Amino acid sequence: MAELALIKTANGQLAPLAANDAELIQQKLKTGDVVRADFKKARNGKFHRKYMALLTMAFDYFEPQPVQYRGQQLTPAKNFDEFRRWVAVQAGFYDVVGYPDGSVRVRAKSISFASMDDIEFDALYSASIDVLLLNVLYGKFKSAQEVDSAVEQILRFA
């Protein structure tokens, strides 16, 4: 089974948080199935959506530049998941992984609801705006406040 996000409704029942959660219930569970779960209160879902809107906006501005690799000029693929991970690492939210040959790599920390609380997620959001202003959004926005305002406007139309 997979992780499932639920939200408490006004009538006191638990309902799927997003479409993928509803799909999981519809496709994986049959009427009468019993499911056991450990419940954890997740961080603010609206803030998670705001972060994803920030990344999506910046990703829309991002255009990979051709690079030289082993004597060939290549244009890297534009990949949202890699972009998201790159932003997190550049913002300082990463784990260092060691390998048997002594080499190390940095890996973006998970932004799942269970892995990051509201305080750490707020720090990630703020640091991500700084990274994006320096590397992707320069010349398009003048300040972190201007970026945040644009993200809020996107959310109002979503």
Image: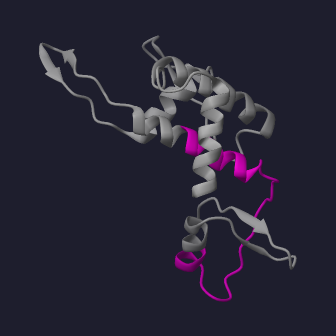
Could you tell me which residue is drawn at 67 percent across and 46 percent down? Answer: 48
Along the horizontal axis of the image, is 97 left or right of 59? Answer: right
Question: Is residue 145 in the magenta section?
Answer: no
Q: Residue 34: within the magenta?
A: yes
Residue 97 in view in this figure: no
In the rendered image, the residue lying farthest to the left is 71
Which residue shows up at 60% across the image and 79% down it?
Answer: 29
Say which quadrant the N terminus sits in.
bottom right
Measured as percent of width and height from the top left, residue 139 is found at 46, 20
Q: Above or below — where is 20 with respect to 43?
A: below
Residue depicted at 62% across the width and 51% down the height: 155
Q: What's the coloring here?
A: one colour
The residue nearer to you, when weighing 137 against 69, is: 137
In percent of width and height, residue 103 lies at 45, 12
Which sits in the foreground, 139 or 75?
A: 139
Q: In the rendered view, does 13 fall on the left or right side of 104?
A: right
Seen in the picture, residue 154 relative to 75 is either above or below; the reply is below
Examine the image and state in which quarter residue 23 appears: bottom right
Magenta span covers which residues?
25-54
Q: On the image, which quarter does residue 10 sit in?
A: bottom right
Q: Is residue 58 left or right of residue 151?
A: left
Question: Is residue 85 among the parts visible in the rendering?
Answer: yes
Which residue is more in the foreground, 135 or 6? 135
Q: Is residue 129 above or below residue 38?
A: above
Residue 74 in the image, given as x and y percentages of width and height: 18, 24
Return the residue nearer the eye: 45 or 38.
Answer: 45
* Residue at the spot 53% in from the left edge and 38% down from the top edge: 55
Q: Quadrant of the C terminus?
A: bottom right
Vertical side of 7 occupied by 91: above or below: above
Q: Residue furthest bottom?
A: 31
Query: Could you tell me how many numbered marks the image carries?
Result: 0
- Counting from the top left corner in percent of width and height, residue 124 is at 67, 29
